[in-house]
Image: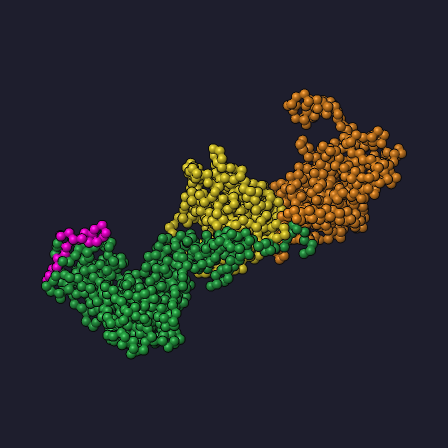
Amino acid sequence: MERKPFAITLDPTSSLANHTGNWRTMRPIYLDHLPPCNQGCPAGENIQGWLYEAEEGKYEEAWRKIMEENPFPAIHGRVCYHPCETVCNRGQLDEAVSIHSVERFLGDHAIEQGWQIEAGKATGKRVLIIGAGPSGLSAAYHLSRMGHAVTIYEAGPKLGGMMRFGIPQYRLPRNIVDAEIARIEAMGVSIHMNRKVENLEMAIKEGIFNAVFLAIGAHLSKRVDIPSPDTGRIVDALGLLKGMEGKEVPKIGRRVVVYGGGDTAIDAARTAKRLGAEETLLIYRRDREHMPAHDSEVKEALEEGVLTRWLSMIRQVDENVITVEEMKLDEKGYPQPTGRMETLEADTVILAVGQEVDTRFLQDVPGLEISTDGVIQVDDTMMTGRLGVFAGGDMVPAERSVTVATGHGKKAARHIDAYLQGFHYAKPPSNSVAIFDRLNTWYYTDADQSHQPYLDLARRRASFEEVVGGLDASTALLEARRCLSCGNCFECDTCYGVCPDNAIIKLGSGKRYEINLEYCKGCGMCAEECPSGAIDMIKEIR
Amino acid sequence: MKQQIEGSQAVAQAVALCRPEVMACYPISPQTHIVETLSRKVKAGEVGNCQFLNVESEFGALSVLIGASAMGARSYTATTSQGLLFMAEAVYNAAGLGLPIVMTIANRAIGAPINIWNDHSDSMAMRDAGWLQLFAEDNQEAVDLHIQAFRLAEELSCPVMVCMDGYILTHAFEEVDLPTQEQVDEFLPPFEPVQVLDPQDPVSIGAMVGPEAFTEVRYLAHHKHLQALEAIPRISQAFQDIFQRSSGGLLKLYHTDEAETLLLALGSVNGTIKDAVDDLRAKGWRVGAIQLCSYRPFPLHALRHVVHNAKRVIVIEKDLAVGNGGIVSSEVKLALQGLPTLVDTVIAGLGGRPISKAAVIDTVKAACLEGLEEPHFLDLNWVAINRELTRQAEQRRSGPTPENLLREVGSADWKTG
Amino acid sequence: MSYQRIKFYQTGTFTVGNRLLEEGERTVQAQKDRTNSLNSGHRACQGCGEALGARYALDAVMRATHNQLVAVNATGCLEVFSSPYPESAWQIPWLHSVFGNAPAVASGVAAALRAKGKTDIRVVAQGGDGATVDIGFGCLSGMFERNDDVLYICYDNEAYMNTGVQRSGATPARAWTNTTQAVGTEPGNPMNVGKNLPRIAMAHGIPLVATASVADLHDLETKVTKAMSIRGARYIHIHVPCPLGWKSDPAETIKVARLAVESGLFPLFEAEGGVVTDRTPIRKQVPVEQYLVLQGRFEHLFSPRDEQALAAIQAMADRNIHLYALLPTEPAMGT
């Protein structure tokens, strides 16, 4: 070594003595930004997180990650209107990731595999939940995981609330509902069916409960005042759907008119069709564009032969005939009468114009505030005016959906837990949203959305078999892998590769990377190239 | 084995006996016979596994050897004149990197005007490149110096030029005693590089060196030449021990004891000079001669030691420092500074002009009796020069000087003696 | 493209690695134990494309040769920023001689290895575009025609950057450099000048000529790996943006390189024995303007807009797209 010519010949990699990190004015940091799907999920699922596990075929890990937030993946994979997909960044690239179909696959797979969730270590606290719908069951599930003893009082004879009584079987098979509820029961939740609470204060005292979660839903159908000599021809949609769960199938006429524009109206129309109605006509006072029902539902209904009549109001229901008035929309999109009347033939009119909360048993609870539209007011911890009494789901002001209700259950559970332990739960702040512009989409493979199989039309019209099928394992895997992992490192090694200064240390599988600040010159290439936008450049402070 | 052989052939045989591993050559007169012979020998499998590359230029040739030598291969090429200048950047680089490449210079003039005949302008132009430069008097010495050059180069890790006069030596058939392979193998050990490109022990060769260390690097190059002053005579002696003849060394002396006037020259002209010395001594002139065998390193002390009793040194050199005079004589003056010895510069033999014994004798007499102007141009055609100078003074577009002179020389019916 | 792109794995083979890919389908750069032939502490500018390209290429060579590599380097940025005394960033045996002789020096290394029977050790010569297309071109051509067993890699940043951004024979049409200033009637480098070295290399009929870009690592590594499976003279021309000389954002080095490829201005192709045998299709074609506008060296084409120049440059890209059939012949695969 000594004989090597002086200065002209150098030892290998001696440049490590030159710490180029001191050139830096900006430094890269790894950040987990909030993916739009997560932000958009009413149930607060870490969708990107569980897709990440699913991408590797780690289905149980993926499922357990969903279960941290939502006890009903198989149900949500079917009935959630997946606002996550509406905001999915991949939608701007080709098509959104079919999140719901992967979730459904995981949920179904978990049921097949019999995966269970353990209750937490007992805290000795007792919580009463009134109502076994999605929010009540969700709260029960989360509180059980936290170790609280949960008792559910359900007024009806069956569990599931709107998941059972509001959503038709062809969208949500009952064995799925049963299986996901059974898993919660197995955690040791004490469930009392046919137990209607008449006096809340009494119930609390009797059961020595430390907190209460009200989740009775909105089961009273709204009525509209339509002159009719024979009100028996008018039925409400919820009654019809509920009737489907009884022993006897409800009877309807040959020609059915469904009045309303929401998802319940569509469910009623499609149910009527399956019950043998020769003609099912959906009447709505505005047009399709202004319908609150989800487009996929409307589309499927039309495919199945449901007829529509937009911009019409029912003015009179007579024997076999109804009178409708044509409407027109004003500038604000509200329907205005035109005076043009028409009569249509109809044997049965199904009203689907909304539901209300049955708040009668709460009238005497001190501090509890019921607004004029019949919903219960809660603070941002979901607590009512009565200390220790929380409420959620359709009975509080919010969008009414299974997913929102399930999210309420979780949120309430966290606040109840905090209340029981004597602190205030604050949601950890999330990083900024991983908007599309953060992504470097060149790196992602072009891959169209995987499509779920549909039952053929003839069988859809005649049976209550599930319309939309699930993905098989390999397709679900591919679909999961379409996830862009927005704002979150998915260990693609791009930062590690593109650094001209080898200043990124690869820590190994699952451990991500670290910036070697001794050599990082702060060029920003890692941040620029990161496909998922998981690196920020921040000002260097010395 | 003694044989009548062309100088180029003899040198090629000698180089082949040194077991070179890589040779890269580009043809240029008068070097061609050397590389032709070597290419044939390599292709015929007579030089082991040696690789002979026909390259696109002299720059390429020496560059190939830089790579080969850095990879630990014994490397050789030959060139001259324009070729040496074309590879100049690599010449400096090879020395800077301390790569023990051996290169034959078949000394030739540099144009313009283009001229293929012998003088020493080419190797003189590279005198500061860091290479050792050994000058052969005859083909026997050319052969012997090549064998010594590999040992010297590899011992010091420094490239060596073996300079032999173009045509005068390269194309001359003489009796040469070519050594045997056994003798060469006994004298020349296998090449053990001081550094090598090795995946098992990677180093970075050829770093950029700034002001903080550049002077030290240059000093170390100089130091290597100081070491060569010791190594050259030692290796010459070692050569003599095995081959039973004296070749090389720093200086070779001819009747220098008691001489008042010493002639000093490089290369083949020393044969003529020795004849002139013989003639002059026969007539009672106290004359001797010094053959400067090692021009780089320049043996300042050895020369001073030999010369210090002489009155006068006449340096006959085949080069010209335009605007100054003698290149070699300037260095001789440096060696003798402080001594009363006079140093004359005789510029001779440029572009292949013959140096006759008579001219040497006349010059010695003139110097001793009348003194010489400084520098003295041997056999200069002053008639032609003066006419051209007049023409140039008369009109701006006086035409190309070389052509004018050629015409002048022809019409004046002027001949060299 | 000489390898099959992997689809459906989130990013397929477009990212450097991907935990979803089989080990063998990830790049050398994704490996935790990659060689880092050019290591940290080198003095390249922020976002240097050449530093990146060199590590990409040499690490792939190291992988392909089981670390039996000797590298020769021409003078230039890469040489200067990697090896100023007393620190070298190289982890491989490395030799720098002068500016114009890297191909010949490498030929010499290869010859020495042949003479010593150590042909398991392989030789790479590397230089910038100036060293390659200009000053070292004679030596390069000689190395090609002799078919010496050398892989020559040109890191093309389209000008003499080490000396402070002067025009080379690889400087593109209308680009500003310090010797093609953005003044006069035709600001920047003139149209219709310069050398296409990959085509010239092809004319030598050598076993392999390929172009590559720092923007497509899989493609680059595949070509380098292929090159090391072949004996004889091979040439790879890698497009490496220079933030300093191109007046581009250091963070956007790869982006700029990608747009050069996606616009068709820098075609990725492969030629064997002088015949184009493969090309890497453009994924999403973009107009040349998107590439040019990111670089200050083309600023004069936009203020005011020089429609004629922009159209002429677009025509160059279109010609490449046509010549190398750069648009995908089949639609993007779906499920």
Judging from the image, what is the letter of the chain drawn in green?
Answer: A
- Up/down of C168 relative to B230, above or below: above
Q: Is residue B115 left or right of residue A393?
A: right
Residue that sits furthest to the front in the current view: A367
* Residue range corresponding to the magenta coloring: A316-340
Q: Is residue B99 left or right of residue C285?
A: right
Decide if residue A221 is in sight here: yes
Magenta stretch contains residue A328: yes
For the stretch drawn in magenta, what is the main secondary structure?
strand
Image coords of residue A298 (percent x, y): 24, 58
- Up/down of A212 relative to B268, above or below: below
Front position in the image: A87 or A468: A87
Q: Quadrant of residue A466?
A: bottom left
**Which residue is found at the position 79% from the left and 30% from the top?**
B373
Chain B colour in the picture: orange
Q: Is residue A94 left or right of residue A166?
A: right
Front position in the image: A219 or A187: A219
Front position in the image: A128 or A234: A128
Image coords of residue B36 (percent x, y): 67, 42
Judging from the image, what is the letter of the chain drawn in yellow?
Answer: C
Front position in the image: A228 or C76: A228
